[in-house]
Structures are given as structure tokens and as C-alpha cells.
Image: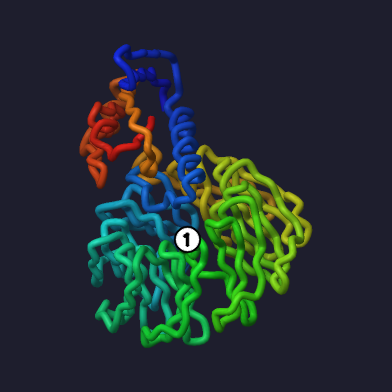
Amino acid sequence: MPDYKYISESEAGAGGVTVQTGFNADQFGDLELLGTLMQFKEMRKTFWPNIERGGSVAAPPIIYKDTLYLGACDGIFYAIDMDGDEKWRFETKAPITIAPSRWKDLIYVSSMDGNLYALHYKSGKLQWKFESTKAMWGAAVHGNRLYVACADGNLYALEAANGRQFWKFSTNATVTAPLVKDDRLYFGFQDRNLYCLGLDGRLIWKYEFPDMINTWFFGPGHYKNMLFVGCYDKNVYALDTDGSLVWKYSGTETMYVPRVWKDRIYVGSRDYNIHCLDALDGSLVWKFKTGGFLVNVELSDGKVYGCSHDNNLYCVDADTGKMIWKFKTNGFVNFATPHKGRLYFGSWDCKLYCVDEGTGRLIWDFKTSLGTPSTIAPPETGITKTAEITWTPETEDEKKKYVGGGGTGDYEINVSQYGVMDKGYASSRKKGYVK
């Protein structure tokens, strides 16, 4: 990407200030995203629903019959062979930020456009879709049924073959895909409750937490007769499967989804650490420090993979907490998928990477359809300052590359694809947008 000239004109006071300097657009984008994330951190909110269209990869792939299936924030769902070559693609109307799921030869894609798409694994042809008015947040498969989470506050039970609805369970806020274990469904998220349902949709119990819980993508962690939940109140909770508290581990920042290996659980945090805890009593075994949020950790063959917002993926020994290797990208890393000695993970830099699990050596990378990383809409604040940003590309070739189709969304953003951001971008956003 060429260097751009950055012009910032403050509208906060009567006398505007204009600064023009040689600046790389990627560097500014990183600073802007970090600033936005710090707002979410201070306000104890989740940024995931605020991810906007761009080429970034936020979700992990799944693997079936030697094919990687991956959704990206460009709204496209990709089928990629094990050498990194595209086989087919399916386009939705909004970012895909949730991992797909599978039943037999159907791949299920959850999009922020409010649809769950069922695609044939070989051709990518649409078999059926299930529509909602809000973003879909993933589906869990059990038997011949799908349990689909939605931002409309409902968990839907669908027939896996054709999408026919059996029942829905309503809550007061966004829910995420459940953990299905021993004929029970465990799920929750924004209304601070962890719900336990039977497969018939009947409530068995619920446990209320002091703040939002993190059950993204996977539901709570599970080991023996215990469930593990990270919470925005800075704690990790262990409940028994009857909904009673067993222990609580207190951190210093929001805790994400715990992953379990042997008698230990591993959890990332907004305090930049991987926390390794004893699963039976919650005592701290070790911590490993990175330079950014750790939305997720993944486990494979005695290794912990820490996906950090300092742009690195870390490989750490699961027993000792010592780093084995790290791999640097040009954007945030959120999730990883290990498979047969390789590790597949996406980055905010608009690429999917394949590296060797043992050494971290790059094998290949795959670029999504957009080279411009996704933005994250800031949370509501009490601040009213706005600004105008204008990017001026150095070459006409770069301009032509991105011509076509502006971006519009919940905040009425109007950004031309070749890089010019007009006044409406700041002024038409909800009150509190800070550039």
C-alpha cells in the first residue's frame, strides 16, 4: 500500500487546525482501532457487534474433507483448499464474524445480515436459509438439529436438513451459540445470565452474573461436571452442571472464554495475559503476558495458542507457560484452528495464515477480497467532538483499485472505496463518535 497524506480538520472549536504529513494508512488504522478498543475496555462493553465491513478475518475456519471454510468481514464465505487456493465463494450482505458449523454435507454460515445460510460443502450452492431481523451469532449442531443464536435475543432450534423451526427460547438480549452436553444446552451473553435448557427448549435453570458473560462461539468451557465462564466483572466462574457456584477466580480485567485441557483451564483477558488455572479449585498456575487483548486461546498437543491484539499469535507450552514461538502479522489476531500439524488463523490485516504448529514457519497465506481492514464503530460516550479525515492516494492506480460501491450501515457511513472519507462519516454517526 502506498503512503497517504493525512489531513485532519478539527471541528471542536471555531478555529480549525489542519495538519498535513507523510503517513502510512496502515499505521493510522492500527492507532484508530486501538483507541476504539480502549473505549470499549473503559466502558466494559463488547466490540464484536460493532465490526464493520472490510477485508479483515475475525472468525476461525473449520475443516472438512481437506477444505477450509472461512467467513470474513468482507461478507464473503470462502472454501479454500489445503494449499491456500480458493475453490469457491458465497457472498452475503454483511460481515461474517462467527465460525461456521457443519452437519453432514451442509456448511452453516452465520452473517450479520440476519441470515443463517446452509451451503453445500462441495459447490457452495445455497440449500436453504433462515432469516431474522438481527445478526446471527453462530449455530451448534447436535443430532439432526441446529441450535442457532441471534442478536434478537432468541435461541432457535431448527431441523438441520431444511431449516424448519421446532422452537425458540427468548431472552432479553443477544445470545451466542450454545455448548451442547449430555442433552443440555448452555448459553448466554448480554443479559448476564447463563441458561441451561433441555433439548426441548424447556428452561432447567439459569445463573445470573454481575455483568455480561463471554460465551462467544463455543459456549462455556466444560470439564467433568463443571462449566467455566469468563465475565466482564473481571472474574472467571466455575459452576457445577446444576447451576451452583463452585469457585471464582478474580482477575484485573474482562475475562474471555475458558478452554480446557486435562485438569487445567486456559483463558485470555483484556489484561493482555493468558491465565492458566487449576480446573478443580481455580488457583493460578501461571500467566503469560502479551502486548494486547487476548480474545481467545486455542489448545493442541500440549500447546496453547494465544491470539493477541498486539498482532502476534503466540505458541506457549501448556504445562510451563514458556513461549515456544510467536508469529507476527500486520493486524489483530482473534482465533486459530489447529489441524494435522498446521495452524490456520486469520488476522485483521485481511489474510488467512497457515503456519507449521511446531515452528511457526509460514507455509502460505490467503488474501480476502478487500485489502482495507475493517473498522470498529465506537461505543456511545458523552463526548461530542467530531473530525473530518481525508485520505489522498499517491497513485491513480490505487484509486481505480477501490472504485465502486460506498459503504453504508447502521451509522449511515459514506466512505468511497478508494479512500476518501467525507464529512458525513463523522457528522452522521451517533453522538459520541471520536476520531
| Image quarter of the C terminus | top left
- In the rendered image of this protein, does residue 183 appear above or below residue 115? below
Relative to 189, does residue 56 appear above or below in the rendering? above
* Residue 269 % position (x, y): 59, 53
Q: Looking at the image, which residue is at 65% across and 66% down?
A: 248
Residue 20 occupies which quadrant of the picture? top left
- Counting every numbered tag in the picture gives 1
Query: Measuring 33% from the left and 79% from the top, which residue is drawn there?
Result: 157
Left or right, 16 with reference to 292: left
**Residue 343 visible in rendering:** no
User: The N terminus lies in which quarter of the figure?
Assistant: top left
Towards the viewer: 360 or 243: 243
Location of residue 27 with respect to 98 vertically, above or below: above
Q: How is the image coloured?
A: rainbow
Q: Position of residue 180 (x, y in %)?
A: 48, 79
Q: Nearer the viewer, residue 279 or 64?
A: 279
The image position of residue 25, as x and y in percent, is: 42, 27
Residue 369's quadrant in the figure? Answer: top left
Q: Nearer the viewer, residue 305 or 33?
A: 33
**In the displayed structure image, the side of residue 90 where residue 354 appears, left or right:** right
Q: Residue furthest right?
A: 320
Which sits in the foreground, 430 or 111?
430
Q: Residue at x 30, y 70 (%)?
A: 118
Residue behind mark 1: 212
- The part of the image, by quadrant, that contains residue 373 is top left
Note whether residue 184 is visible: yes
**SS at mark 1 in the image:** loop
Amino acid type of disc 1? Met
Where residue 325 appears, as percent x and y from the top left, is: 69, 47
Residue that appears at 53% across and 56% down: 232
Q: Residues within 10 Å of mark 1 (few under 14, many from 20)?
A: many
